[in-house]
Amino acid sequence: MKISNVEITTYSIPLPEPVEAYAAGIMKAFDLVICKISNDNGQIGVGYITVHENQGLAIASIIKNSFVPLLIDKDPRLIEMLWKDMWKATHYAGRGAPVSFAIAAVDVALWDLKGISLNEPLWRLLGGHDKNVMAYAGNIDLNFNIEKLLDGATKSLEYGFKSIKMRLGRESLSEDIERLEAMKNHLPDDVMLMADANEAWRVDQAVNAFKEIEKFNLVWLEEPIKPDDFKGYSYLRSLGKIPIAAGENLHNLSEFNQLITSDGVDFLEPDLTTCGGITPFMKVAKLAEINNLPICSHGVHELHVHLLASCPNASYLEFHAWRIDKFIETPLVVKDGFTQPPDKPGHGINFNFDKLKSYLIN
Ligand SMILES: [Mg+2]
């Protein structure tokens, strides 16, 4: 089997309304990069990544200029070999984002193609553990007033979620506490709450925040400090106040290894788009398993549902606020807090390219 064609398209998808998280600020749209890889049997694998606005074209350009020449005529089934070739080709300017995003788009397309050619859904191809995956609503809501914050939580419950994440990192800690109190009072007792500070604090500020936030019994507090302060994570976790989640801003296996071996995290949340695709995500998942840690996910839930369904140490799947539901044939359904991957070959995500057409930016 040989790769006969690689096609890359980039879209700018507007969000229904502006949303805010501390590290990124206000977001009005996100970019979607789609990579289609055809083999000489006429089968097509589709990979994609989502990224902040105005960054998709740079990632698409890495795929076009650096990866397409080395992919054509190669055997698409040799994913580890092709992954290593892409890593090596961009090593000097790479070893992380945005190259990791570019490798991820190709890697997903290769895994999809493998699933299609073997007539196996991705979650079984990757090991197959449990189709029922716990899902939570990863709401982005730092800029919402309390009424709108609670309204968003109500909509998530109506959608079928039993766990919800809200954002922290307002001007003052007292504002964050007020919002947490309002949310806790609003949610039924059987609904779990997570919070994400999106790197809002220094370590000393996080220590203060932990003292105030401990009483809310959060499932976790996510990214209290900047993502690569592994010593800081280790210290905060040693306090034993609140379970810590992190991983979405780590871009290679070495960074995950450092976070895990520094005992800095309770819930690992890799994002296959930021760390180089399905291939490294599964290695992180195994590393987590070896270290007796649960594996969660960040972003692109239609893909991650397959990965978590294949892992014995799977925990929560994030339903990210960047939704592509309008552009795919069968969006995931959430019922009583759980969702399932489709049983179609590959990842089973069929884009409606007619609907996407007006958002094309290249
Ligand atoms: Mg986060």
Image: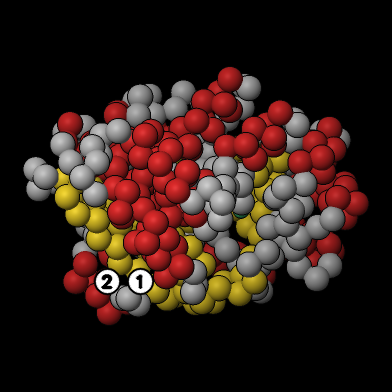
Residue 79 in view, yes or no: yes
The residue under the point 57% across, 37% down is: 253
Q: Position of residue 196 (x, y in %)?
A: 67, 54
Circles 1 and 2, Cβ within 8 Å, touching? The answer is: yes
Count the marks: how many?
A: 2
**44 or 233: which is nearer to us?**
44
- Is the CB–ligand 1 distance for label 2 below 8 Å? no
Per the image, the residue denoted by label 1 is 11
Dot in front, 1 or 2? 1
Name the kind of residue labelled 2 in the image: Leu
Residue at image point 46% right, 32% down: 282
Q: Amino acid at mark 1?
A: Tyr
Q: Is residue 221 left or right of residue 28?
A: right
Is 22 rendered above or below residue 348?
below
Give the Cα distance between marks 1 and 2. 7 Å
Residue visible at 47% across and 43% down in the picture? 88
**On the picture, is 182 further left or further right than 206?**
left
From the viewer's perspective, is residue 42 above or below residue 289?
below
Q: Residues within 10 Å of mark 1 (few under 14, many from 20)?
A: many
Residue 128 is labelled as none
Q: Secondary structure at mark 1?
A: strand
Q: In this figure, which residue is indicated by the disc labeled 2? A: 356
Residue 199 x/y as whole percent: 73, 57
x, y percent for residue 43: 13, 46
> For the C terminus, which image quadrant?
bottom left
**Could you tell me residue 306's position as x and y percent?**
36, 38
Considering depth in this image, is 2 or 178 the residue closer to the camera?
A: 2
Q: Left of 74 or right of it: where is 313?
A: right
Residue at position x 29%, y 28% from top? 124
